[in-house]
Image (cartoon, rainbow, N blue to C red):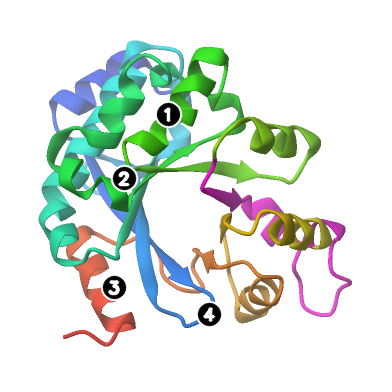
Amino acid sequence: MAGANLDEIRLALEKREFFLVYLPIVSLFDGRCVGAEALIRWRRGAEIVVDACEFIPSTEGTPLSGVITYWVIDTVAAEIGGWLVHNPDALISFNIPPEILGRGGLQYAAVKSGLRSRVRQVILEITERGVPDQLGLDALNSVADTGARVALDDVTLSGANLALLTRCNFDMIKIDRALVAQLTSGDVLPTWLGGLKTLLQTATSLQVIAEGVENAHQAEVLRTAGVQMAQGHHFSAPLPAAAYKRYYAATRGSP
């Protein structure tokens, strides 16, 4: 499946084989769900569900990348746009590929479709490689004017990551799951954790989401380090829209 070609992906769009699931984002301080990340999946046949990592890389650098991104945005709007109106504290995030940065796509992602009125609840996620040029940087730094927030995804706290943080107005960073996996019970804490604490002390408005949290030990270490939010199977697997809404309500004591 890793070798899915563009024609197959294009046909899947036409046949409506793609769907979304929502991975809850949870506060490490009180356990309440604060939002979700929208993730695309591909249903191939009756029983095969394909993760994005197995087909999205094939679209990078092509017009299809933007088409899929806009499909995700419009589907989020259709599935939970009305719900976001009634839950104004809930956040929704989705990935923005480099192809649409600085070329009008970021503005679409921030304010178009049914999410326009909920733009302050939107988080646009980009990776380090998703800021390829000055045009992209300028677009990122102008997102604040729309009201949306920008998160740097897959942060490894490397020199390149940290340099990018000084060049862009990021509201959030997402700690890569590979770093979180290093938080094992009984072991000496990894050195990156001290660097993260320092970063949070100097950038007091920066919010941090840890990805791939699998157990209570990891959650507690991250909370102690000052990380505000997390996602991963310790809290919940990705959920269909209806199940996500129920999960959100249950963690917040709502009916």
Label 1, label 3: how many angstroms apart (C-alpha)?
A: 31 Å
Indicate left or right for 149 with 191 as reference. left
Q: Which residue is mark 4?
A: 29
Looking at the image, tell me whether mark 2 or mark 4 is earlier in sequence order: 4
> Nearer the N terminus, badge 2 or badge 3?
2
The span from disc 2 to disc 3 (Cα, nearest Å) is 28 Å
Question: Within the image, what quadrant is residue 156 found in?
Answer: top right
Judge depth for marks 1 and 2 and give the one in front: 1
Which amino acid does the dot numbered 3 rest on?
Tyr
Percent across and percent down for residue 166 are 68, 35
- Magenta-span inclusion, residue 213: no
Q: CA distance from mark 3 to mark 4?
A: 16 Å
| Secondary structure type for disc 2 | strand
Q: Nearer the viewer, residue 139 or 123?
A: 139
Q: Which residue is mark 3?
A: 248
Q: Residue at x 73, y 55 (%)?
A: 202
Q: Nearer the viewer, mark 2 or mark 4?
A: 4
Does residue 112 lie above or below 82 as drawn? above
Q: Position of residue 121 (x, y in %)?
A: 30, 53
Furthest toward the front, the residue is: 145
- Which residue is at 21% across, 49% downward? 118
Q: Give the CA distance from mark 1 to mark 4.
A: 31 Å
**Looking at the picture, how far across and down is residue 188, in whole percent?**
89, 71
The Cα–Cα distance between marks 1 and 2, rounded to whole angstroms, is 40 Å
Residue for badge 1: 142
Q: Secondary structure at mark 1?
A: loop
Pointer 2 local density, CA inside 10 Å: few below 14, some 14–19, many at least 20: few
Look at discs 2 and 3 and give the one toward the viewer.
3
Residue 18 screen position, x and y as percent: 23, 38
Given this view, does label 3 or label 4 mark the residue nearer the observer?
Answer: 4
Looking at the rendering, the stretch of residues picked out in magenta corresponds to 170-193
Q: Which mark is residue 48?
A: 2
